[in-house]
Amino acid sequence: MNDKLTISSVDIHGHGCDVTELRKVLPSEEFSIEAASLFGLLSDSTRLRILYLLYDREVCVRNIAATIEMSPPAVSHHLRSLKQFGVITSRRIGKEVHYTISDSEDGRLITDMLRTIFEKRKVYE
């Protein structure tokens, strides 16, 4: 019974690394699934383009659709995915719905990531 515990915690390759210590810093499976979902959400180029448009501004569906040359229903599909994850928020102004990146933890993470990318790629110079 202790053999299993001992085998899993020994330095198998002689690198001076204890697997037990590595397990202490490994994120939980639940966290990893959540992070993978966020990365999956961001892996779509259309959703990234939408997020670029929403960076630091509020934009209605029609203007997003016209800017990225897509139909409003197709844009709404992407917006729905982003909203379900809590990355963006919406508000109705008359008959139009306007979107912006949310002030949630994930929304701030996205904003920080976009800011870093913009600065590194000198997008706003």
Image: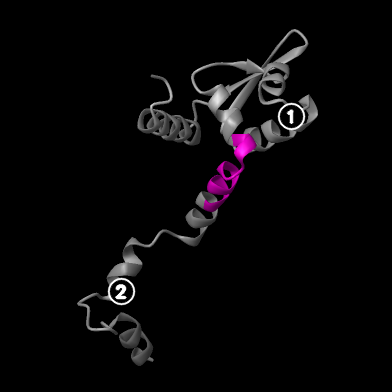
What percent of the width, then of the height, locates residue 31?
48, 54
- Please identify the dominant SS of the magenta region: helix
Q: Residue 11 falls in which quadrant of the image?
A: bottom left
Earlier along the polypeptide chain: callout 1 or callout 2?
Answer: 2
Q: Residue furthest top?
A: 94
Give the residue displayed 20% in from the left and 77% down from the top: 16
Q: How many residues crowd around disc 2 within 10 Å: few (fewer than 14), some, or many (20 or more)?
A: some
Does the rendering let one see residue 100?
yes
Instruction: State the extent of the magenta-drawn residues as a range.
Output: 36-47
* Secondary element type, mark 1: helix
Give the residue displayed 45% in from the left and 31% down from the top: 114
- Is residue 90 located in the magenta-colored stretch of the structure? no
Residue picked out by circle 2: 20
Camera-side residue of 49 and 86:
49
Amino acid beneath label 1: Ser
Camera-side residue of 25 and 12:
12
Residue picked out by circle 1: 76
What percent of the width, then of the height, locates residue 76?
74, 29
Give the residue displayed 48% in from the left and 34% down from the top: 110
Compared to 37, does 117 lie above or below?
above
